[in-house]
Amino acid sequence: MPVRKAPLRWRALGLTAARTAGATALMTLAAMVALHAIPPSAGLVNAVLRVVLPMCCGASVYFAAYWLFGGRELQMLLNRGGAGSASGSS
């Protein structure tokens, strides 16, 4: 059985990588700012806040930045329209 080879769409891959890298950089910055906004102290509440707040801030910034950068891959993955909807133009 012969193996089918499809050419990679390098431009689309590069744009996806750039969007992901940009959103990741902004996420990291937001998480660091949120972490430094909570002074370290003893106690469970402080420990939980120092984990949860940066994580939520980072995730929010990541998805907002990715959407603003024109990211559409997550929508393509979650689309219930089937595999045919992801095979459009780049």
Image (cartoon, rainbow, N blue to C red):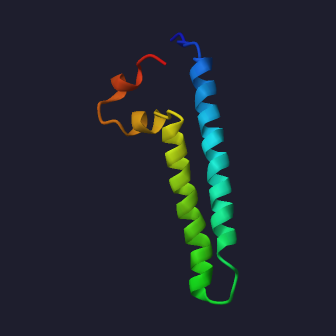
Q: Quadrant of residue 39?
A: bottom right
Residue 4 position, x and y percent, is: 53, 12
Residue extending farthest to the bottom is 43
Q: Is residue 17 left or right of residue 75?
A: right
Relative to residue 20, is residue 41 depicted above or below?
below
Q: Residue at x 45, y 39 (%)?
A: 74
Q: Could you say where residue 60 lies in the image, as x and y percent from the top left?
A: 51, 55
**Taking 89 as reference, is 31 left or right?**
right
Q: Position of residue 16 (x, y in %)?
A: 58, 31
**Residue at left 32%, top 30%?**
82
Closer to us: 63 or 3 = 63
The residue furthest top is 2
Q: Tell which of 75 and 67 is nearer to you.
A: 67
Name the image quarter holding residue 5: top right
- 58 relative to 12, above or below: below
Rendered view: 90 above or below 17: above
